[in-house]
Image (tube, rainbow, N blue to C red):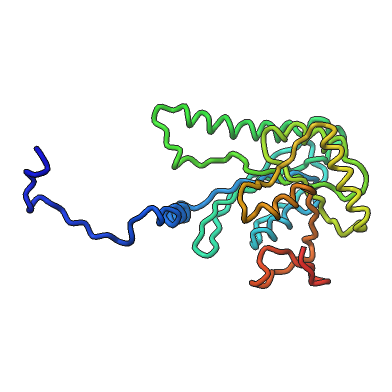
């Protein structure tokens, strides 16, 4: 039946809820993303007591449950915890994966294997979901890791063989961001030398770490500066909540200066 045959009684009148135009597409995308919520999966690699839990508490302004771990673990095992966070009506499903017992064994040459096995398992689980005839990826809890925060002891010397070996095994599977923990225990001069030494060893061994994207003009300058010196240093044991006007910085409780 042609369009001219449609009577006035069969025509529907739709009431618009707002402006219609392609200029509203960004707002629609933001609204859709916020309504769906966000997922962030982070892997924390480092020795027991180096400050992994403290950094997570500081980053997300939340006190997460903590299980005490000894330095006498026979094997390395990964402990995963998922939390539903909300900030300004934005929902975040955060999964923190901790490497319990990493670096505590006498023979540590294969400490990286449980970590690699865990990462591979998450890829395999997602692949199997994709291969299903009736798949539902929108409802599938994606457990693939977004980033690995690799904590290094502030020795001021070169990388330990364990750390170099582990990062060589991980960098092709997950984005690695090296972090010098408890950086206030060494001088600024030694800290800078340590960072240069770390980057030199990583480059000479072909280990690629995460490079911040520079395609966004709003973030190009700051991300480019981060890529020049990608190894980060943290001091979080004396952190307090930041004032609203200084959001995004970490404050030293004693000196009151942002980092």
Q: How many marks?
A: 0
| Left-right relation of 96 to 88 | right
The residue at 82%/38% (across/down) is 163
Q: Nearer the viewer, residue 23 or 154?
A: 23
| Left-right relation of 36 to 207 | left
Q: Residue 131's spot in the image, x, y percent?
A: 47, 27
Q: Residue 242's spot in the image, x, y percent?
A: 69, 69
- Locate the N terminus and report the quarter of the image it occupies: top left
Q: Is residue 234 above or below residue 120?
A: below
The residue at 77%/42% (across/down) is 101
Q: Residue 50's spot in the image, x, y percent?
A: 81, 51
- Locate the C terminus and report the quarter of the image it occupies: bottom right
Which image quadrant is residue 256 in? bottom right
| Left-right relation of 228 to 40 | right
Which image quadrant is residue 175 in? top right
The residue at 82%/36% (across/down) is 203
Q: Residue 159's spot in the image, x, y percent?
A: 87, 40
Q: Nearer the viewer, residue 69 or 109?
A: 109
Q: Is residue 252 above or below residue 51?
A: below
The residue at 49%/63% (across/down) is 89
Q: Is residue 2 above or below residue 24?
A: above
| Left-right relation of 33 to 243 | left
Q: Nearer the viewer, residue 182 or 216?
A: 216
């Amino acid at each position: 039946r042609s369009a001219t045959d449609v009577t006035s009684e069969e025509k529907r009148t739709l009431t618009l809820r707002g402006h219609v135009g392609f200029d509203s597409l960004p707002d629609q995308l933001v609204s859709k993303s916020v309504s769906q919520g966000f997922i962030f999966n982070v892997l924390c690699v480092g020795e027991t007591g180096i400050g992994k839990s403290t950094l997570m508490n500081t980053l997300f302004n939340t006190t997460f449950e903590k299980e005490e771990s000894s330095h006498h673990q026979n094997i390395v095992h990964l402990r995963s915890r998922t939390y539903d966070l909300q900030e300004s009506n934005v929902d975040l499903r955060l999964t923190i994966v901790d490497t319990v017992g990493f670096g505590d064994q006498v023979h540590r040459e294969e400490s990286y294997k449980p970590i690699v096995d865990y990462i591979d398992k998450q890829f395999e689980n997602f692949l199997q979901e994709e291969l299903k005839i009736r798949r539902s990826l929108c409802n599938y809890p994606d457990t693939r890791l977004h980033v690995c925060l690799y904590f290094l002891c502030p020795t001021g010397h070169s990388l330990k063989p364990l750390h170099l070996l582990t990062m060589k095994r991980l960098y092709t599977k997950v984005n690695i961001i090296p972090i010098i923990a408890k950086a206030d225990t060494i001088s600024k001069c030694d800290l800078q030398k340590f960072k240069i030494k770390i980057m030199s060893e990583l480059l000479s061994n072909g280990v690629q770490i995460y490079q911040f994207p520079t395609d966004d003009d709003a973030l190009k300058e700051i991300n480019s500066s981060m890529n020049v010196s990608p190894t980060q240093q943290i001091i979080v044991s004396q952190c307090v909540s930041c004032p609203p006007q200084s959001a995004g910085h970490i404050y030293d409780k004693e000196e009151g200066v942002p980092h």
